[in-house]
Amino acid sequence: MKETDQLDPVEARMLALLQKDAGLSTAQLAEATHSSPATCWRRLKSLEERGILGPPVRLVDPARVGRGMDAFVQIRMKSQDSRSRALFQRTMELEPAIIEVYSISGEWDYLLHLVVRDIADLEEVLMRRVLELDCVAGSSTLFALRRVKHTTEIPV
C-alpha cells in the first residue's frame, strides 16, 4: 500500500479544477488558485513526478460512439496461482471493450466493466477473450439499465 501524499490547499484546488477540465492552462490555474503561473507550473510538475497527476485525457460519451451498453461481468477463477492471475490480467488488458478490471473479495474473483455496442458484441468479447481462458471457471453478467451517476473525479 502506498503512503498517502500530503496535499497543500493549492494543490488540492488544482487537482479539483483539473479533474473538471484538463484543458485549463497554467495561467488559468494560477488565477483560480491565486498563485503565479511559475509556481503553478512547478506544482503541476511536482504532482506529475509524485504520480498523483497522470496524463490529461478527454472523456468520450460511449453512447455517442455506438457503445451505449454497460455490462458488469463477475469472474470466478479455477485457480488463484500467480500464473493464472497474470494470464487473465494480461488478456483483459488487451481487450478495448473491457474498460475496468477489479480484483475483488467475496464469492467472485474479478469484476469487469465492459462498454459494448449490444448483446452480440458482449457475447463476442466474453466468448473470444474471457471464457475461452482455461483459468476461468465461470461468470455472471449484470446489465446497467442506465447510468445514474458516472464521474472520474476523485475527492481531494
Image: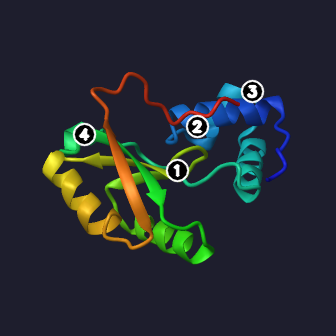
Compare residues 98 and 150 and report the one nearer the observer. 98
Task: Say few, some or many: other residues with alpha carbon within 10 Å of mark 2 (under 14 / 14 to 19 / 20 or more).
Answer: some
Residue 28 picture quarter: top right
Residue 53 shows up from this direction: yes
Q: Secondary structure at mark 1?
A: loop
Query: Which percent across, then down, holds residue 50?
Result: 77, 55
Q: CA distance from mark 4 to mark 3?
A: 43 Å
Query: Which percent across, then down, holds residue 91?
Result: 42, 70
**Residue type highlighted by circle 2:** Leu
Residue on which the image places disc 3: 34
Query: Which percent across, then down, holds residue 142?
Result: 33, 38
Instruction: Determine whether, in the image, residue 86 is placed left or right of residue 49.
Output: left
Residue 53 in the image: above or below residue 144: below
Would you say the residues marked 1 and 2 are in contact, meaning their CB atoms lie under 8 Å apart?
yes
Residue on which the image places disc 2: 18
Task: Say few, some or many: other residues with alpha carbon within 10 Å of mark 1 (under 14 / 14 to 19 / 20 or more).
Answer: few
Q: Which residue occupies the extreme top position in the image?
A: 148
Residue 39 picture quarter: top right
Residue on which the image places disc 1: 56
Residue on which the image places disc 4: 69
Q: CA distance from mark 3 to mark 2?
A: 15 Å
Residue at (35, 46) in percent of width and height: 140
Residue 130 in the image: above or below residue 21: below
Quadrant into which the C terminus falls: top right
Residue 66 in the image: above or below residue 17: below
Compare residues 146 and 59 and report the one nearer the observer. 146
